[in-house]
Amino acid sequence: MYDNEIKDLIKQLGVQIRFSMDLDNEGYYIPEAKLIVLDTKLSELEQKKALLHELSHAAKHNGNLELYRATYNARAKMEREADDLMLRMLLKKYLSNSELETKDLNCIKFLECNHLDLAFENRVKEIIAMY
Ligand SMILES: [Zn+2]
């Protein structure tokens, strides 16, 4: 169900994926156990987004756990970074599937297609600007 890029990332990071029926969040990353827990109730797309978000934490924030738990600002920054990485991976996939040039991308269409909050529009623009 996951594409190769995601499988590679999971392998590379050495994380395990588990599913749980009663989460109060879409997903969690537990660094001490290198474990990502996802909510079984999510649709495939929602699950993929949650997985990408949690994988981003595993990739970027493994050593910063105390900081994450300690301060609101640090947590907000890491959440933003995790969303950015999720957006980058979805965007890459979207561009290669649609065979669109980056300059021809319609941000709103991309967000709608992935059932993402339209509030992400500016961040998608920032990401594209870095291409
Ligand atoms: Zn997060």
Image (cartoon, rainbow, N blue to C red):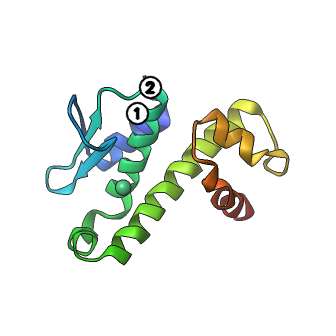
Q: In the rendered structure, which amino acid carries the disc numbered 1?
A: Gln
Choose top left, top right, bottom left or bottom right for residue 98. top right
Q: Residue furthest right?
A: 104
Choose top left, top right, bottom left or bottom right for residue 63. bottom left
Residue 5 at what x, y percent from top left? Answer: 48, 38
Q: Residue at x 44, y 38 (%)?
A: 6
Label 2 secondary element:
helix
Residue 116 at what x, y percent from top left? Answer: 57, 43
Left or right: 4 as drawn, with respect to 117? left
Q: Quadrant of the N terminus?
A: top left
Residue 37 at what x, y percent from top left? Answer: 24, 40
Cβ at disc 1 under 8 Å from ligand 1 = no
Residue 10 to residue 127: above or below: above
Q: Residue at x 40, y 33 (%)?
A: 47
Residue 73 to residue 102: above or below: below
Q: Residue at x 73, y 48 (%)?
A: 107
Residue 47 is tagged as 1
